[in-house]
Amino acid sequence: MRRHLSAAACGVVLAVGALAAPPAAAQPASSPPAEPSPSRPPEGTGAQPYASYWYPNTLLEWNPRTDPDAPFNRSTTPLRPRVSDPALKANPNARAGEARIAALVAFAPTSGNPSQGSLTSNYYAFTHWQYVDTLVFWGGSAAEGLILAPNATVIDAAHRNGVKVYGTVFFPPTVYGGRFEWVRDFLRKDGSRFPVADKLAEVAKYYGFDGWFINQETEGGDPQIASDMREFMKYARAKNPSVHYMWYDAMTEDGRIAWQNALTPENDAFLNDPRPVAHSMFLNFWWSEAELDSSRAAARALGRSEYELFAGIDTEANGYNTFVNWNAVFPDGRPHVTSFGIYRPEWTWRSSRDRADFYAKDSRFWVGANGDPSDTTTTSPWKGLADYIAESSPVTRKPFVTGFNTGHGDFYNVAGRRVRTGGWNNLSLQDIPPTYRWVVESSGTRLTPSIDFGDAYEGGSSLRLTGRLDAANTVRLYQSRLRVDRDTKLSVVLKTPAAGPSRLKAAISFTDAPTTFTTLDLGTTHSGDWERKTLDLSRHAGRTIAQIALRASPGGAPVDGYDVRIGQLAVYDGGVERPAPPTRLTVLGTSDVTATRKSLRLSWRPSPRGDVHHYDVYRRNADGTRTYLGGTPNTVYFVPRLDRAGSETSTTIEVEAVSTEYGRSAAARTQVTWSGDVPAETNLALDRPATASGRCAAGEGPENAVNGNPSDKWCTLTAEKWLEIDLGSVHEINRFVVKHAESGGESPSFNTADFTIRVRAAESDP
């Protein structure tokens, strides 16, 4: 059966009660949806901002100066240059500088992408950027909006890793609510102008992303419509050269919807007509080796690169169990035939049982069955993308600082101290992940590197090395291109279970001998807490760092149970800069969630001095401590939850700037006021940290049990079923309320029939 890209049919499936409900876009063509303006909160409120989405006509009405959500969707992270040294590729079969990888990812339904993260760790926190060149922020539906712009968090993370980001324009088939008038609205001209093309460029430039993926699958076209579409892209390309367009192989030059699965005379005018039209083309999924060979020849005949063609595969349903004719794209020992496009790689998250399962599946998808990009041997046809694509690294300028923060977690630490408990996700705060995950070289037992979500120096995770240490282990982490100057330093923050020898060295190689490491001893630790070791690199001034690694050695007898965490690794010049504080911190608006809880929108002026990586937002507590509310590289931030402490009448909000070396400014402050009496009874469990024995699906985690929304649920099928909620402190509990399946619209027969409620005040209590 022919499959084609369809955001409606293949979109996110939300569990509502016992039914897997399709997105609202899947509506009968006989009753097309109305075309309302997408819902926006009134200016001055503290409502949740979401990524922008439109129909063609509503896009023409959009103005960032009057859209209160627009500033929250704006990325300030520029696209980083990357390096890919063929001498440093992990896998000998992989090739650099040939095929590019495009990933089409649906992070959430079209209308449900929070602008700046949210209060759950259950999120597709993608970390294998080293194999991807372009991320398409997939979405669009007949019922919500056809045009979806990426949110700020995804743009920030992608650009920090040197990956371009495209929004999506999706014209669905009529069976999924498509209306051909939307295509005509999109292509309407005003004199010599295409107004929608001008707006698409305005959106991309304002929000800070790189282009658009155009998927036209609505039936009813003709040769004139196809010609108008090509003129639209040529106009857009000439008017705004920095905004790129990727065309999907669906509509042909006569206006029909007829997937070619190749570059053919039926669709090649969308690439050249005869001038360049689209910057690239995504070929439908059912290509053959012969079709890709002919596509390569056809692209070259047009004066275009074969790597501007992306041979698509559909992994939404089966992930790495999908059949792929790998040799047709990546023939052994020969240049790649085309580039490669992956539709819906977030299968690794949506099909996972929990976070550990997600990370295992994501590694299997990108790196291979062995979790080692240098060794992709397997009996499975799916070897992992690392078998074909050489890693690229954005570690090309100083300062380079990583805390191995993946952009989600169960708590938040700042400088090794816990400042927030509870799940969160925010890809704007994700550090550059290691280039090699994981390459460990040893003549003995290999240590096991992992991302550890149990402790962190900055954020919600750290790097951990564990195992039996009976020989030297070199753990390759980053490929880089960092020039060493007279004041360059390398800093490592580490933590051992107890004071004693760390048995660990920092290891760096240089471009004049990229595979030979120079080591610098990190010495002993003096406690079981985080400690910083700063190393002077001045004797290597004038050289350029090609790799950054760690080397662990027993230094004598083997060490059973070796265990060390790395909380930060940094290469920088001079001292650690402390920027000036931001100014004019302002509460733009608040919304009352409950009598004792608000959400709010903040803004401030940027720090007048210093290079700022991001801003951290806190509340000041009565005892003088602070609770972390979130962070952003932007100068606006949405706080999804601010809880009233006791009967306080106001809460102090603080924002401090964090430099690119992670020095911190003094705080800017403002007040949020509370009115009314504190209610006699409140829900102590609302949005508190929750853990469980498991989950039935990615969207049915324990956080759903405490989010106050009965339309979703926590579900588990584990043998021993349990749910635990951390109330944060000692409380007097008057009653328990448990809402079962029936509250969410399911059959009463699905209600939990037998359960026990226990309370405990400490970890050791029963």
Image (tube, rainbow, N blue to C red):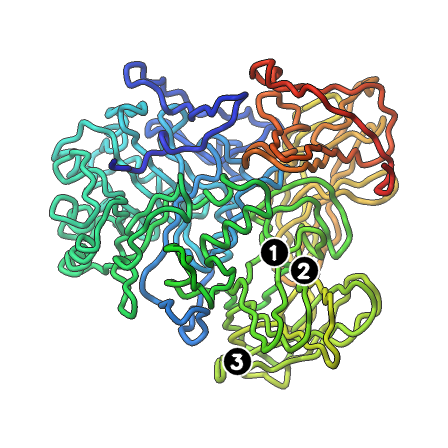
Q: Quadrant of the C terminus?
A: top right
Where residue 692 appears, as percent x and y from the top left, is: 68, 36
Point 68% across, 64% down: residue: 466
For this rendering, which residue is in front, 132 or 738? 738
Q: Nearer the viewer, mark 1 or mark 3?
A: 3
Where residue 704 appears, as percent x and y from the top left, is: 63, 29
Q: Is residue 116 above or below residue 90?
A: above
Secondary element at image label 1: strand
Q: Nearer the viewer, mark 2 or mark 3?
A: 3
Mark 1–mark 2 contact, CB under 8 Å? yes
The disc, 1 or 2, on the residue closer to the chain's N-terminal end is 1
Where residue 15 appears, as percent x and y from the top left, is: 51, 26
Please identify the quarter of the rendering in which residue 737 is found. Answer: top right
Residue that mark 1 sits on: 613
Q: Quadrant of the N terminus?
A: top left
Report the amino acid beneath label 3.
Answer: Phe
Where residue 588 appears, as percent x and y from the top left, is: 63, 33
The disc, 2 or 3, on the residue closer to the chain's N-terminal end is 3
For this rendering, which residue is in front, 309 or 574? 309
Point 76% across, 23% down: residue: 683
